[in-house]
Image (cartoon, helix red, strand yellow):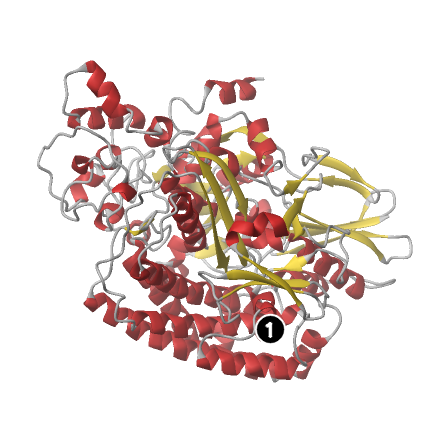
Amino acid sequence: MQRITIDPITRLEGHGKIEIFLNDEGEVENTYFQIPELRGFERFCVGRPVEELPLLTNRICGVCPEAHHMAGAKAADAVYKVDPPRTAKMLRELLYSAFYCTDHTTHFYALAGPDFVMGPDAPIAERNILGVIHKVGLEIGGKVIQMRKNGHNVVEMIGGRKVHPCTSIPGGLTKGITEEQRIEIESMGKWAIEFAQFSLKLFADIVLGNKAYLDLILGDIYTHQTYSMGMVDENNHVNFYDGQISIVAPDGERIGKYLPADYQDWIAERVEPWTYLKFPYLKKVGWKGFVDGKDSGIYMATPLSRLNASDGMATPLAQEEYDKFYKTLGGKPVHQRLATHWARLIELLYAAERWVELATDPEITSPEYHTIPTETPSEGIGIVEAPRGTLTHHYWTDERGVVTKVNLIVGTTNNNAPISMSIKKAAKSLITKGTVVTEGLLNMIEMAFRAYDPCFGCATHSLPGKMPLQVTIYDVNGDPINELKQYC
Amino acid sequence: MTTKPKFAMYWAASCGGCEIAVLNIHEKILAVDENFEVVFWPVAMDAKYKDVDAMEDGEILLTLFNGSIRNSENEHIAKLLRRKSKILVAFGSCATEGCIPGLANFTPINEVIATAFSTPTTENPENILPIPDYEVPEGELHIPTIYPLIRTLEQVVDVDYFMPGCPPESHQIAAVIDLVIEVLKGNAELPPKGSVIGAGLSTVCDDCERTRNIKKIKEFGRIQMQHSDPDLCLLEQGIPCNGPATRQGCGALCPSAGAQCIGCYGPAEGVIDYGARLISAFASVIDSDDEEEIDHILDGLVDPAGQFYRFNLAGSLLRGSKAAVSVEHK
């Protein structure tokens, strides 16, 4: 049995490793997608005052601390059974919308973009953000920097800090915003809408306009039939901050929606001894192994699944793009995983539109941003849509509000099983008898996980780092016969 | 052939916030590019690991290392980069003092791992736990070994400078980069080895604009249980704010936003034990001489261990609880 090791995988947040086993025919027998670490937040959050959890769980991930801060704050609200004032909820969602714009921008331009703008098998030295900027022009690079800057400025204005925001507490926020800040936020939001539209046009020109890429997206290599998960509002439109979780079957039928409080009826997690990361699945459907189809409880929680699980977008420009998306790709649901990149840009546009909507609400500058809790704290669940999937925080406390138990089901963890399957399918499709395994080919296997924008820092509540990739191919006796190094 | 000095940045067990903070220096990144040859920075570029391996010892001028040492892999890379770097900076709270994940040092590691795999949604009737070497039908699979205690970078290799913060503030990062560039031009000198850089010497209180009235308190409160006064010292309102023991450097961001300082910049200059300094600061605001009343007031601090060692447990004299440390000694 030959073995190909990809360790670590790159251009993602966090660390993972892929083992590919080839049989004597030189075909892929099996693949394993392994996550090497965990930090154990579930244990050491115990004993802490619950109001600290939105601050402590921030440190699960410095790329999306806003998501943990929000899920943590909502869970802490629920622990105290306190409903924050409308202004507080709007301010949190405003911060969150600006964050989404920044985060989706980073993924599209710096992590995934190089595969399309430069090409899947472009020279390694060019297949990165600098290559992208050189190709599309410095002016666009400047826009990307501006988008990130604006987003972080809004996060700081509302959240107190650019990284690891600190203002959400049980019952609302520690501060509001002034009219001067509101005007600035609104203006940056309008710019973000233009930036999102520009990004969609860039995608249309570079990716959709290129037949080879379109074939790659529509082809079988990166396609899976799994359930789709995503948060929706009362109109079944995509929402990132609040709502119910909608589940849509591979054939497009909505099998149900659940409130955050009911997540345990829907989600279970499986443990495998060869990875530190668990595999969530739909409890009502059950775990049937790493297989596609309606009988398998495996689901995805990504920009693509959020679009699949919804009936549309809550804002007009994003809705137009939503319609165009399904028209181009042949109707709902879409299972081609590379289409996730397009879905992510549609979400970017929605987040920018929502940013402006919230910034122009007359109550956004109200001083009513905190309700003092009056109930005895006990137990609470908070769910938001993190950019990388549905994020669930569940806290139990004693009567003083000191945490006694924690459960976290984190964005990327949802996608552990589908990512494993996507890697296996890409490997099986790309490596057959006699295939010369090139660096470009291995990158195409990596593109299978990159579509999910995984963050294994979040997933394992650890982030040990991106490391270079080294591939060693062994013969049956375990002797190395070929070595490839990528980013290393 | 470039003659620019070489720069590297790496993350071990960390959250990625340090990388985001560096990216948030925005245009200043171009100055890094102008003055350094970036040879290894996985977040920003496809760095070449084999090049790091093939480098002469000390060939990299400056490495910013963030993240703590949680497992065998983190340790391996820390040692490699130490060898290859002239100047190794422990960058951010995880590398300098262990940060929030260091709170795991309160608990024996087997309990930490077992908790993660027995949560309410985990279906694990056979109590399966991941193991470093596992045989599958196709061959053996490996994952790194998790160590009993989180360690700081200095507990594993020799460190030249320490840059605190969770994460270090971007303006501080920009200032440090400017300094190094001036040093390269011969216009400035590096601080003595072992210095804390990118931060002040005093405490967060020195940067905090809230008014202090030397007022004493009869009870500690919780931030969510009151509408706090935006202009008064939070500690004097009974909110346990870590400002008095925490190093200056962030510009008092959290207190300015209505939230208490949680101590992410670590101990102020000269503070040997952060917890002891903070206990003394809290004691000084307690308005009582009666032992029983003092006990009652202190009961308002619902999590003293977390309060006093939230970010710095791994790097403190304690390192962890007795139970957790004893696992390491085994």
Q: Left or right: where does residue A414 sit relative to residue B314?
A: right
Q: Nearer the viewer, residue B40 or B319?
A: B319
Chain to which the residue tagged by mark 1 belongs = A
Q: Secondary structure at mark 1?
A: helix
The residue wearing badge 1 is A116
Query: From this viewpoint, which residue is outermost toward the front?
Result: A375
Left or right for A450, reference A64: right
State the residue lying farthest toward the right: A25
Q: Is residue A364 above or below residue A382?
A: below
Q: Residue at x 86, y 58 (%)?
A: A27
Q: Position of residue A58 (x, y in %)?
A: 42, 47
Residue A74 or residue A118, whichever sits in front: A74
Determine whether A133 is above or below B191 in the image. below
Q: How busy is the neighbourhood of tag 1: few (under 14 within 10 Å), some, or many (20 plus)?
A: some
Quarter where residue A249 is shown: bottom right
Q: Residue furthest left?
A: B213
Residue at left offset 77%, top offset 57%: A291
Please state the horizontal and vertical placement of residue A488, each as a whole percent of the image. 61, 53
> Residue type at mark 1?
Phe
The residue sitting at 21% across, 49% down in the picture is B256
Coordinates of residue A184 in the picture (x, y in percent): 25, 70
